[in-house]
Amino acid sequence: MSLEELIPPNHMKSHIYSILIRTGLVLSTLLVALCIPFFGLVMSLIGSLMTMLVTLILPCLCFLSIRKGKITLFQVSLCVLIIAVGTVSLGIGTYTSLAAIIQQLS
């Protein structure tokens, strides 16, 4: 459920509530970014973890799970290769981000 879905139905025609909610979210993000000195490094850590997981690893795992027993050896091999590349990329990105955060802290 999004925040805009909480707007009462009789106020849905007015876009002022949507604008206020979106402005508040942007301002809160700006406040967090300004308060955390290494916000970019934290975002790169989250990005390296989540991007590889969501775009490469999980889709292949779901495909293998859903199509279990109905896929060819080539498809299994390709999925395993994609999962391996995603895992290596996740590891390298996470290591690099953590190293930068540790360097920033010391």
Image (tube, rainbow, N blue to C red):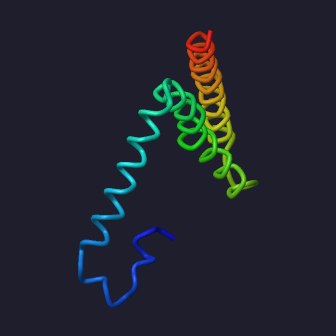
Q: Seen from this angle, which residue lies furthest right? A: 69
Location of residue 60 with respect to 18 vertically, above or below: above
Q: Position of residue 31 (x, y in %)?
A: 42, 41
All told, the count of numbered labels is 0
Quadrant containing the C terminus is top right
Q: Position of residue 46 (x, y in %)?
A: 56, 34
Location of residue 71 with respect to 50 vertically, above or below: below
Residue 8 occupies which quadrant of the picture? bottom left
Location of residue 28 with respect to 48 vertically, above or below: below
Please report the residue visible at 47 percent of the width from the left and 33 percent of the height from the top: 35
Please report the residue visible at 51 percent of the width from the left and 70 percent of the height from the top: 1
> Along the line of sight, which residue is nearer the eye, 94 or 23?
23
Residue 6 occupies which quadrant of the picture? bottom left
Please report the residue visible at 31 percent of the width from the left and 69 percent of the height from the top: 18
> Along the line of sight, which residue is nearer the eye, 45 or 51?
45
Q: Position of residue 84 (x, y in %)?
A: 66, 28
> Along the line of sight, which residue is nearer the eye, 19 or 75?
19
Please report the residue visible at 36 percent of the width from the left and 48 percent of the height from the top: 27
